[in-house]
Structures are given as structure tokens and as C-alpha cells.
Amino acid sequence: MTVHVVAPKRLGDARFDALCLRVGEAAEMMTDDQILCLADVLHEALRVRRRLRHEVQERVERRLCASEGLAFPF
């Protein structure tokens, strides 16, 4: 049986810290509108990811439970 995991690749701590530093440096040269636009893009990416996870969980519960309750009651 193959188990598929729906999860993004993890960015390592060192690479994340470097990214944060670069974005912070870039933000110093950005307008307020550009910073808000970047924040909106990241927020939308989070919303899409959470919606996908929710849809996957609902499909799994429908298939495993077939009207008999939640497959994952935690």
C-alpha cells in the first residue's frame, strides 16, 4: 500500500533564516504597497495550502468512514 503525504518540501532553518534576511533587506527598498502585495501573495499561498489540506481530509474521511463517523476523531 502506497501512502502519499500532502506536505510541502521543508525549507531548512539556515535557508529560512537567510531568506528572511534577504526579504528584510529588500523590504527596506520597497514601497508600503509592495510590502503589502508581497504579504498578500504569501497569505494567499497559505489559504490555498490550508484549503487543499481540508479537502484532502474530507475526501479521506468520506472514503474511510462511509457515513459511519469521523475517520480521525482527534
Image (spheres, helix red, strand yellow):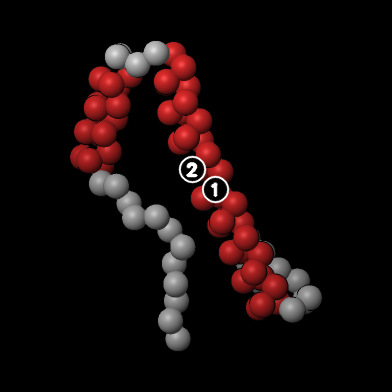
Vertical relation: 34 (above or below) 61? above
Which amino acid is tagged 2? Ala
Vertical relation: 26 (above or below) 10? above
Q: Position of residue 46 (x, y in %)?
A: 50, 43
Tell me the quarter of the picture where residue 17 sits.
top left
Q: Badge 2 local density, few (<14 within 10 Å), some, or many (20+)?
A: few
> Which residue: 56% across, 57% down?
53
- Location of the C terminus (image quadrant): bottom right
Q: Would you say 71 lies left or right of 42 here?
A: right
Q: Secondary structure at mark 1?
A: helix
> Which residue: 27% across, 38% down?
16
> Which residue: 43% across, 81% down?
2
- Location of the N terminus (image quadrant): bottom left
> Which residue: 44% across, 13% down?
32
Q: Would you say 47 lies left or right of 11 here?
A: right
Q: Position of residue 52 (x, y in %)?
A: 56, 56
User: How many numbered callouts?
Assistant: 2
Q: Position of residue 70 (x, y in %)?
A: 71, 68
Label 2 near label 1: C-beta < 8 Å?
Answer: yes
Residue nearest the viewer, comparing 45 with 12 = 45
Tell me the quarter of the picture where residue 28 sits.
top left
Q: Position of residue 63 (x, y in %)?
A: 66, 77
Q: CA distance from mark 1 to mark 2?
A: 5 Å
Which amino acid is tagged 1? Val
Vertical relation: 60 (above or below) 30? below
Tell me the quarter of the picture where residue 65 sits.
bottom right
Q: Badge 1 local density, few (<14 within 10 Å), some, or many (20+)?
A: few
Residue holding disc 1:
48
Residue nearest the viewer, comparing 72 with 61 = 61
Q: Secondary structure at mark 2?
A: helix
Residue holding disc 2:
45
